[in-house]
């Protein structure tokens, strides 16, 4: 619940007021600002310049209705046309305010100046004789805005801009699944065992003895690992003699070991294929929890709650306690484990039970501090957060 003060609607009036609102900071040891710019993207489009341009032709790139033209000379070259169009676009103020142009290696690239702002463009070539046609424009990266940010949501930061952290709600598209690869070398008499540490628990498996060859032994190891791991943790697959461990959910951090005994030719070599890093670990990239502010206006005239808009400065609690949204199907007790949603509809919400699209964070980072009175169902609870210094 976030309605209060000038955010409160007539329908919110009740005999007993709620204990508080999502995003209320109760204890503040460390607050930091981030910019809601994570996940946004500038449009990037390309045009192929012909290897043998048409001599004396006029090449025109029209951006949002404004034409930028370059006329080739009687012995046109690819670089001449590419450089000429780059200069024409960058010298046209109304267009340069939208995009910047850069030519290299036969490709003219247009990049929007502002992330989230798209543009349309066409190309033409008129006049001249001979030569090849200019390429059909294509867009390599579409423009994208950052999502709005609700109060009381977990936020991650994967980058910064001009010293300011770029924050966003955690999602499966923002994070990457961690991957480990264990290459098995097997020999008669070899015995394999190991463990996987994930979500604060260690799952042991083994012993698997050498079977036929390295590929078959790896298959058996893969099956043994999957037999002990619960859902929404890590899954093992096999590729020839490689046992590949992949986090079930983006943002889940894990570690694993496979040991071999009984034969000199038996071994397992571990490689960190992807991660661990901030991009593969929600716990490492966690920046804080979005705080409630009364000067953040509602983005819609009817319904909804106030949210931080794209590119707004977001006040984040990094260390302290804060009220957050509780799923009313869950009963929260102090000390409960914390899982953070990466699902698009609930990204950044907190839970105390595992599930699909939920990522566990260690109690050193976040723990439930207070639930909700059994007589109420406002969906409010208190998280203690420690996202770093």
Image (cartoon, rainbow, N blue to C red):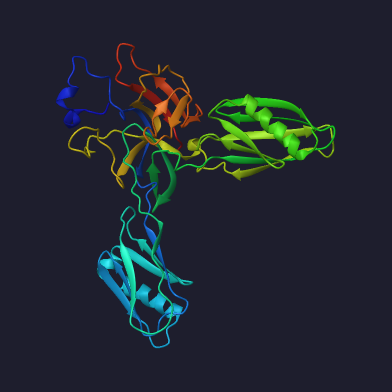
Residue 229, above or below 296? above
Which residue is most to the bottom?
74
Question: Where does the image place residue 151, in percent across and percent down from the top left?
Answer: 31, 33
Q: Is residue 188 left or right of residue 28?
A: right
Location of residue 154 by image quarter = top left
Please state the total of marks drawn on the protein image: 0
Residue 74 at what x, y percent from top left?
Answer: 39, 88
Tell me if residue 24 comes above or below residue 214 in the rendering: above
Residue at the location (39% across, 85% down)?
Answer: 129
Image quadrant occupied by the C terminus: top left
* 105 left or right of 239 in image: left
Out of 238 and 309, give the one closest to the viewer. 238
Name the residue nearer the viewer: 269 or 110: 110
Residue 230 falls in image quadrant:
top right
Q: Can you see residue 263?
A: yes
Find residue 29 and report its horizontal and vertical position in percent: 39, 32
Identify the residue at the far left of this view.
10
Q: Is residue 11 left or right of residue 211?
A: left
Does residue 257 lie above or below 351 as drawn? below
Q: Can residue 185 be seen by looking at this rendering? A: no
State the image coordinates of residue 135 (x, y, percent, origin top left): 41, 69
Q: Single out the residue that lies furthest toward the front.
A: 130
Q: Residue at x 45, y 25 (%)?
A: 367
Residue at 35 percent across and 66 percent down: it is 100
Residue 96 in which image quadrant: bottom left
Question: Which quadrant holds the N terminus?
Answer: top left
């Amino acid at each position: 619940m976030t309605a209060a003060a000038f955010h409160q609607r007539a329908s919110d009036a009740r005999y007993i007021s709620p204990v508080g609102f999502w995003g209320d900071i109760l204890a503040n040891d460390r607050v930091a600002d981030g910019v809601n710019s994570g996940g946004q993207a500038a449009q990037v489009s390309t045009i192929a310049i012909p290897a043998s341009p048409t001599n004396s032709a006029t090449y025109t790139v029209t951006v949002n209705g404004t034409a930028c033209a370059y006329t080739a000379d009687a012995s046109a070259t690819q670089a001449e046309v590419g450089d000429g169009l780059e200069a024409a676009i960058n010298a046209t103020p109304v267009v340069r305010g939208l995009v910047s142009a850069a030519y290299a290696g036969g490709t003219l690239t247009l990049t929007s100046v502002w992330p989230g702002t798209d543009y349309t463009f066409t190309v033409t070539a008129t006049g001249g004789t001979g030569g090849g046609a200019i390429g059909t424009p294509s867009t390599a990266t579409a423009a994208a805005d950052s999502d709005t940010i609700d109060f009381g949501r977990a936020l991650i930061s994967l980058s910064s801009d001009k010293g300011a952290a770029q924050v966003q709600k955690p999602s499966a598209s923002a994070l990457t699944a961690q991957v480990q690869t264990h290459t098995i070398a097997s020999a008669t008499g070899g015995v394999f065992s190991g463990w996987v540490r994930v979500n604060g628990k260690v799952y042991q498996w083994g012993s698997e003895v050498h079977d036929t060859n390295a590929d078959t032994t790896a298959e058996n190891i893969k099956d043994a690992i999957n037999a002990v791991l619960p859902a929404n943790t890590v899954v093992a697959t096999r590729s020839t003699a490689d046992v590949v461990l992949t986090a079930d959910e983006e943002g889940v951090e894990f570690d694993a070991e496979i040991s071999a005994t009984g034969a000199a030719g038996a071994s397992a070599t571990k490689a960190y294929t992807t991660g661990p890093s901030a991009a593969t670990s929600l716990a490492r990239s966690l920046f804080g929890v979005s705080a409630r502010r009364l000067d953040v206006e509602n983005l819609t005239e009817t319904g909804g709650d106030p949210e931080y808009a794209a590119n707004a400065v977001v006040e984040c609690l990094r260390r302290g306690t804060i009220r957050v949204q509780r799923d009313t199907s869950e009963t929260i007790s102090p000390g409960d484990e914390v899982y953070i949603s990466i699902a698009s509809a609930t990204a950044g919400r907190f839970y105390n039970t595992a599930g699909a699209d939920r990522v566990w964070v260690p109690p050193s980072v976040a723990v439930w501090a207070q639930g909700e009175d059994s007589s109420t169902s406002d969906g409010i609870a208190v998280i203690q957060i420690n996202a770093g210094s």
